Structures are given as C-alpha cells and as structure tokens.
Image (cartoon, rainbow, N blue to C red):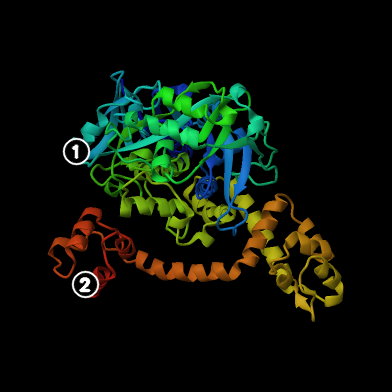
Amino acid sequence: MEFEYDVIVVGAGHAGCDAAAAAANLGSKTLLITMDMNKIAQMSCNPAVGGIAKGQIVREIDALGGQMGIVTDMTAIQFRMLNRSKGPAMWSPRAQSDRTRYINKWRETLDSIPDLFIWQDSVVQLIVKNNTVVGVQTALNVAFHAKSVILTAGTFLNGLLHIGKTQMSGGRISEPASFGITEQLVDLGFEADRMKTGTPVRIDGRSVDFSLTDEQVGETDFHKFSYLNFSPRPLKQLSCWTLYTNEAVHEVLRKGLPDSPLYNGQIKSVGPRYCPSIETKIVTFADKAQHQLFLEPEGENTQEYYLNGFSSSLPLQIQLEALRQIPALRNVQIYRPGYAIEYDFFPPTQLHPTLETKRVKNLFFAGQINGTTGYEEAASQGLMAGINAHINVHGGSPFVLARDEAYIGVLIDDLVTKGVDEPYRMFTSRAEYRILLRQDDADMRLTEKSYRLGLADSKRYELLKEKRDEIEQIVSFVRSYSIKPEQVNPALVAFDTTPLRHGVKLIDLILRPQLDMEKVASIVPALKEQLELISNRKEEIVEAAEILIKYEGYIAREKIIAEKINRLENIKIQGKFDYSTIQSLSTEAKQKLMRINPETIAQASRIPGVSPNDINVLLVLLGR
C-alpha cells in the first residue's frame, strides 16, 4: 500500500503545527505525524505566548498567514503589552493561554485544512536516497513517501529527564523519547550535540494564600496578536500573581545542591542562560536576598498554576521544602515537580537560510532541533520551513526574510550564520533595525509578500490595503491642516505644553511628547472628524499613524542604513571561491567560510571570526 504526500512534518509541537498548516494552505498534500494527537501544540513549559521580542515574532507569523496568533487570541485568559514605558520599537504583546483550549483550538484548526492529514505514530527513520529525503519509516512499520520532509522533533530526540538523581527517558514528562533519527543523521555526516532545558513545579491554586501575593491584572484594550480577529476575547480574563523567594528558601535550595543534576555532573549539556533554574540563580546571584516569581494560571477552569521563575531539577523533597518557606505557599500542594530535560540538536550552521539541510536535499529542520528555545521561535521556523518545503515541491524562488524585514529574518540568519552555543532565544537587542521591526507594522512589512506567495488570503490583503490607505489619509491630513494659536492655546496650557506663538501645521502638535493623537483630536474638531471616517479597527490604525508621525526621522535613518547593508546582500559568493586556497584570508576566516559557505558577502561579514579585512579580500577578488 502506497502513502504518497508532497510534504511530511514530523512532530506536532509549535514548529510542526505552523509548518504543516503553511504547507497545506499553500496547496501541498501534507501529512503531520505526531506521537499523541491529544497533545498537539502542547505548551510544555509556561502556558503563555509572546513577550519581549517574542510577541513581535507572533505578529509576524500572523502577518504572513500563520496560525499561532489567531489560536492565541481565541484561547487567551490574559493579555498585556509589555514595555509600554519605552518606545514603540520595544512594545511586545504577551498572552496567557488556556493550555487545554489552546491544544483543542489547534486541533480544530488543523482538521479544517483540506490538504492536511494527521497520523499518530513515531518516526524511527528517514528514507534517504542519493542524499535526498524521500519519506519516513514509523514505529508501526509504515513507510510514508514525500517530496519534502520537515523534522520538528522538539526535545524528543534521545530525551532524558532529570529530577534530582532520578533519571528517566522521555521527550516530556510521561511521554516517550524518540530514538534512531539522531544516529541515522550522524551516519549521514551531520554534526549533533546536546542541550538542556527545564520547567518549574505545577501548583494547586487551592493551596495558595493569594492575600500574600500581589495581583497582576491583564489589559482589555484593542491590542491582540492577530490582524484578523476583531471579536472580544472569548474566555474569562484572569490575573497572574507575583511573589518572592527569601533567604530561608535559598538555604533549603543550597542544601540540595549536592543532589542537583546541574552541579553534580549528571547534566553535561548547556542550558538557557536567559532562563536559568532557581538553583543557578542562587549560585550565580549569591548576593541577592530574593528573586521574583510569577504564579500564572494554566486555564479558565483549572486550579493548576505555573510558577514562573522557579525552574528546577532538584529532588522533589527539596523543591517542596523550599516552596513552603514562601509565606503564600506555606501549605502548598503540587501536581508535579519541576524537572530538567536533555535532548539532541543539530548545530544550525548545517542549514541553508530556507532551513533546508545542506547535506540532505528536501530535508528541513525547524524548532528546538536547531538549538532554539521558545514556542514563538519554533513556530516561526516551522512557518518558514513549511513555505520553503512547499516551494521545493512545486517550484518557485526560495522564501527568505532579510534582517531589516522581520525578527524572523534576524532569527534564521543568526542561526545559519553564527550557530548557537546555548539555547537561542530572541531579544530586541539581537535586531539592529528594531525601529523597522515594530509589532504594530508586521502586516505592513510582510502581508503583501505572503499574499504574492499565496499564503495570506485575499481577506487579509484587503484589510492591509484598507489600513494602509487610512493611515496615509491621516498622515496627509495632519501634514496639510493648519492651526492657529487662538484655537488651541488654552488647551495646550492645560496639557502642560508650550502655547503657540504663530500658526503651525497639525503635525507639529502631534510631534510634541506631551501630546498624542487622541489629545489633539479632542481640541481640533477637524482631526476628530477625520478619525471618525475610519471604518473599523480605529484604535489600531490611529496608533500606527501616530507612531509613523512621531518616529519618522528615526525610521527614515534606519531605512538608509539598512539599504546600504542590503547592497552587500545582493553580492552572491556561494560557489565562487575555494576559501582554502586564498592566502590573504586569516586561518580562522578560512575555516569559518568553508564551514558556513555563506550565500552573500553580507552573510559572510556576520560570521564570527571573519574580519572586515577578510571581507575586503573577498571584495577585491570579486572585482578581479
């Protein structure tokens, strides 16, 4: 019996779900293989999406026609826009999700896509012929054939769980690990390594004294993840709660360090520096008397809470004793302890920017298998791999985003150019064009590209054009409309800003830091009338127009810098040099250039160890 598909996606985590949805929505007959159909898009760690820089990625996924933003909006039990005290380049949306409903909504989404099929099984081997993947073999001894395969194995490849000195095989707690694929890929010439991540204890909310915590309520304004979803949030909105460790907690934790897998040599792989375990915190920051923790609800109708900031692999009794030193948790009951997990990954410098592997054609890697951490980083890679796997099957130009086009472009370029020496997490600081990559304008940057590709549909594209036209009308109006001192001076004094001495254009008022579009509209009836012409999504469009007005100079300057760098992106060098024979290059540059084999001069310039002098050597040789 023959099972033939265009694209097979192995693993139904966040990378696998968006990969499968993208490939199928583009028209590829797609098979998604998962060990457990009841845990599709499982939130293995905290039940939250977004955050600093991660929220921008989710908005980009949505702008491109991906599904993560829509599913998050439909299952959110709290939403907040982080970094509001900073400029709009730093604003980052974040939502708590109902974990169970998130899974169910993803399953519903996948089941509704006509060309997408699901198979419950474990893949034990890739079928590779002439350095080209042609299918997969499963534990049920079924061979599925496809023109492209996307591997999104998460933490399941040779996964090993640690709770104190207790070790058990698994991809997540109570879920089996996957064996065989790493060994096969190594035999094919791939380099593999190990990483570690961890997750905190899950707490029974009925045993928490919330009167001894501080409530952190969500926001109810218009902000959300998807550019499509206009309805009110369908689920009840819940609070998070903050609390702190203390010296008594730290003393108990220190007592358990000899049995900590992180410090007794049991765990040998590297973990995420930016999300350290609680035992790492008390060692690295030994002078700190307390560390902040967050109790985050797991769902609308459950008592389960996630204790953010208390990731640990210490023995169960140490975790429990330490928690009970916190006043709010003195009678705490838990559902399960925190644990660490080690798993295989493949250094991502073995990938093309499309996420196709260099050694095996039509084989793509996405998610934690590439050394990243985070649902959002995984989903964005899955989306891009799904798009490019479809292109490999049906033809077309590779779909790659530049560093000035998307955080997704920064993420993938960092991975394939620089590699990783710890689990990679996206930060705004990693992007040199932050002002161009704001969360408010992801649709303006990316939706038209995706529409041309065939992923973003006509409804999404029409909404983009409507939004663009209305923003342009607002900006044009405030540039041309004149205002006289007597019309606004009393109100300007009330707003604690300098009165006018002569007439100005309306834009000059909006540019003042003490004023915004809403305040100016309250004192200038003509602007109020102009804003009332907006058909829908008024708050979103007014905010986007105001950001463009207030940050016009910064945006223009960053675009000029990006355009200069992009000239180097157009200089293709892949296949043009035998780096080992170029005597003028440093030894390190030769080694790095041979290993990465960059596609452009610009990519070569971003490789650690390749100096400006090395780039000049290549430019001179190209000139010859």
Residue at numbered disc 2: 621
- Residue flagged by tag 1: what amino acid is it? Leu
Q: Residue 88: x, y in percent?
A: 59, 58
At numbered mark 2, what does the secondary structure look like: helix, strand or loop?
A: helix
Identify the disc placed on residue 305. Answer: none
Q: Which of 442 and 268 is in front in this view?
A: 268
Q: Residue 19: x, y in percent?
A: 43, 38
Q: In which quarter of the image is the N terminus?
A: top left
Q: Do residues under tags 2 and 1 come within 8 Å of each other at their CB atoms?
A: no
Where residue 624 sits, quadrant-wise, is: bottom left
At numbered mark 1, what does the secondary structure look like: helix, strand or loop?
A: loop
- Residue flagged by tag 2: what amino acid is it? Leu
- Distance from label 2 to label 1 (Cα)? 34 Å
Task: Classify 551 as above or below 437.
Answer: below
Task: Classify 85 as above or below 272.
Answer: below
Q: Earlier in the sequence, mark 2 or mark 1?
A: 1
Q: Residue 455: x, y in percent?
A: 50, 45
Mark 1 neighbour density, 10 Å: few (under 14) some (14–19) many (20 or more): few
The residue drawn where x is 24% and y is 42% is 360
Q: Nearer the viewer, residue 582 or 400?
A: 582
The residue drawn where x is 62% and y is 53% is 84
Q: Residue 25: x, y in percent?
A: 48, 38
The residue drawn where x is 22% and y is 57% is 592
The residue drawn where x is 28% and y is 58% is 598
Identify the disc placed on residue 188. Answer: 1
Task: Classify 389 as above or below 171.
Answer: below
| Residue 342 relative to residue 549: left or right | left
Q: Nearer the viewer, residue 160 or 263?
A: 263
Mark count: 2
Asked if one can make out residue 71 in the rendered structure from this viewpoint, the answer is: no
| Residue 456 relative to residue 586: left or right | right
Where residue 156 sits, quadrant-wise, is: top left
